[in-house]
Image (spheres, rainbow, N blue to C red):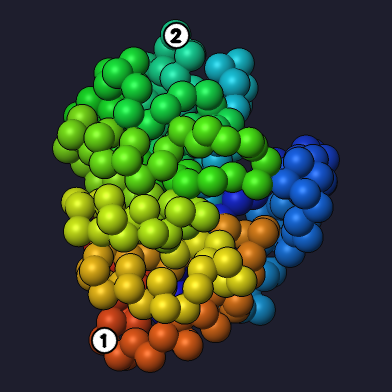
Amino acid sequence: MLIDFHTHAFPDKIAPRAVSKLADDCGGLQPQTDGTVASLKEQMRIDGVDISVVQSIATNPHQMRKVNDFAISIDQDDAIVAFGSVHPDAPDALEELERISDAGLKGVKLHPEYQGFYADDERLKPIYKKISQLGLITLFHTGHDYGFPPPYHAMPEHMKRALRWFDSPVVAAHWGGFGCCFLVLEELCGEDLYFDLSFGYGHMPKPTAQAIIDKHGVDRLLFGSDMPWNRPAWEKRLLDSLGLSPTDRAKIDHENAQRLLKLE
């Protein structure tokens, strides 16, 4: 079984435009789907993925409810687990978290670059506490981002400080922080959070990947691709190169995600 913990999809009406703009903003990345759920599911079939966790982002307060309406609608699909999102500047962010929880979504995605906050900013404390009260999972984009200049807002040191406000699971995307793997080794490995292993293929040096796995431990690692930007098959190739035991690979591929998502 394979669970891809980090994917993206958009409503059919806006998917082509959204993917095109994101690709352009990130320097011409080549998308592997057209951004729709149907296209994601087709790539899942080709690459052997059983369940994809779709991570939506409310990039401004006004679109927050629509973003979560979409997440709630696709969460009905047996092959999809959808996360919602709240924007820290939305006056009704705490109420929206309750709606996300009441709808049965299992988590929220936060992107400090797109949403304009530092992960350890005190003003996020009420949101983090509400997430924890509701028992939701929080997935952060962490590290650098192709679409933004530095300074970056969710570096390992920011994440380490933010963890003190959480009592529910936290996932740091992209091996704990895209483009800052040595800081991940110094600051985050061994802390009480998960790493998703998305967007590592072609970017994560093999010796560093092995060092992160050895130091953080396989019980808190989650397979991910960041579709449509990297294919699951590519990420499997990276993991195949690391000589993991079948037991450890099963934890990364699906067992840790099943436990975290409370899937039977």
Label 1: which secondary element: helix
Compared with 12, 149 (above or below) is: above
**Quadrant placement of the C terminus:** bottom left
Residue under numbered circle 2:
91
CB under 8 Å between callouts 1 and 2?
Answer: no
Instruction: Tell me: 165 left or right of 199.
Output: left
Q: Position of residue 210 (x, y in %)?
A: 36, 77
SS of the residue at dot 2? loop
Question: Which part of the image, by quadrant, shows the N terminus?
Answer: bottom left
Q: Position of residue 258 (x, y in %)?
A: 31, 65
Q: Nearer the viewer, residue 112 or 255?
A: 112
Q: Residue at x 24, y 69 (%)?
A: 215
- The location of residue 79, given as percent across then percent down, is 51, 62
Residue at x 27%, y 33% (from the top left corner): 162
> In which quarter of the view is residue 121 placed?
top left
Q: Which residue is drawn at the image coordinates 41% and 85% (left, top)? A: 242
Q: Can residue 122 be seen from the camera position used here?
A: yes
**Which residue is found at the position 53% from the left and 33% from the top?**
151
Which three-letter amino acid code belongs to the residue tagged 1? Thr
Q: How many marks?
A: 2
In the image: residue 208, left or right of residue 134: right
Q: Which residue is mark 1?
A: 247
Q: Determine which quarter of the picture holds residue 97.
A: top left
The numbered mark, 1 or 2, whose residue comes first in the sequence reads 2
